[in-house]
Image: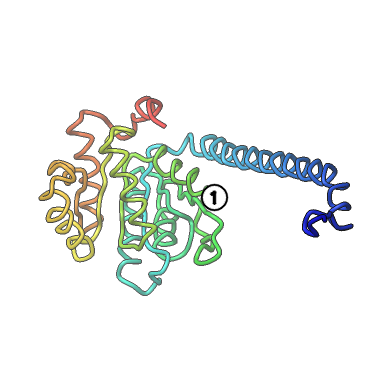
């Protein structure tokens, strides 16, 4: 007597009949999905490349320049805003274009100070769901969708970096500059921290936790200079290049070796 479990039901017969077609459709669907994913990745790469090309072309003539980083959340009535505006104005009058993130807060202060000065004010704007609203103090305005391409523009076209008080974004830009310099992936540039009251705790932590535990060399802390006045920022930049017997206006040939 046959085991009832061994007798195929009508549903089993139907599924067996259409199984080859189902497998073929599944394979075709997988191929279509893979093709679509590849196309999307290709467009993504082309989008990044287009941002590299546009920023390189539009910023090729602004050297020498200084990239200023700072918080988008510090308002116009804060002392940090006034300090950033003053630093940018003096840099601009000293012959440096000023590059900022193009948004509100201290980015606006940097562009505003440079806009009132003698040299170009540059904004590297990026599309974000919060905080990023283009400020109106920009002689040259670029828009990015990708943080990676924007970071390269900050580094490639700068003769110095100035980190004003800020949050994660500012710390990200600062540590990026330090890492590239420490590892020799970019030329050594002045990296200036503005505001002893804000940065001294971080520098002490780096000494206690990074240097003392031999996670970085003691000399790595010398990559940064702490300043408390706009005049000290200007003096620090020129002193850096005088020690190397290079003018910050003659950096273009050296910059071609990197990035």
For residue 252, side relative to residue 196 (left or right):
right
For residue 1, side relative to residue 251 (left or right):
right
- The image quadrant of residue 168 is bottom left
Q: What element carries label 1?
A: strand
- The image quadrant of residue 28 is top right
The quadrant the N terminus occupies is: bottom right
Q: Name the residue nearer the viewer: 31 or 20.
A: 20
Q: Which residue shows up at 52% across the image and 53% down it?
A: 125
Q: Name the residue nearer the viewer: 124 or 9.
A: 9
Question: Dot 1 corresponds to which residue?
Answer: 141
For residue 213, side relative to residue 46 (left or right):
left
- Is 172 above or below relative to 160? below
Check disc 1: other Cα within 10 Å, few if <14, some if 14-19, many if 20+: many
For residue 7, side relative to residue 253 (left or right):
right
The quadrant the C terminus occupies is: top left
Q: Which residue shows up at 33% across the image and 60% down it?
A: 84
């Amino acid at each position: 007597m046959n085991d009832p479990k061994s007798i195929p039901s009508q549903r089993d017969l139907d599924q067996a009949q259409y199984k080859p077609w189902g497998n073929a459709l599944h394979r075709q669907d997988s191929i279509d999905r893979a093709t679509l994913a590849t196309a999307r990745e290709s467009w993504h790469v082309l989008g990044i490349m287009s941002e590299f090309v546009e920023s390189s072309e539009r910023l090729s003539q602004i050297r020498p320049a200084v990239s200023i980083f700072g918080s988008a959340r510090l308002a116009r009535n804060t002392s940090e805003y006034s300090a950033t505006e003053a630093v940018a104005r003096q840099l601009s009058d000293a012959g440096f274009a000023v590059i900022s993130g193009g948004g509100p807060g201290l980015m606006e202060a940097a562009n505003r100070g440079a806009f009132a000065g003698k040299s170009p004010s540059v904004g590297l704007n990026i599309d974000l769901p919060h905080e990023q609203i283009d400020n109106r103090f920009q002689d040259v305005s670029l828009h990015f969708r990708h943080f990676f391409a924007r970071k390269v523009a900050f580094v490639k076209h700068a003769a110095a970096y100035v980190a004003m008080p800020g949050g994660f974004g500012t710390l990200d830009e600062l540590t990026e500059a330090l890492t590239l310099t420490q590892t020799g992936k970019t030329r050594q540039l002045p990296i200036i921290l503005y505001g002893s009251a804000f940065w001294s705790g971080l520098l002490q932590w780096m000494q206690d936790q990074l240097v003392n535990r031999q996670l970085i060399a003691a000399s790595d802390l010398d990559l940064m200079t702490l300043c408390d006045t706009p005049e000290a920022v200007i003096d620090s930049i020129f002193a850096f290049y005088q020690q190397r017997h290079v003018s910050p206006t003659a950096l273009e040939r050296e910059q071609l070796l990197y990035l």
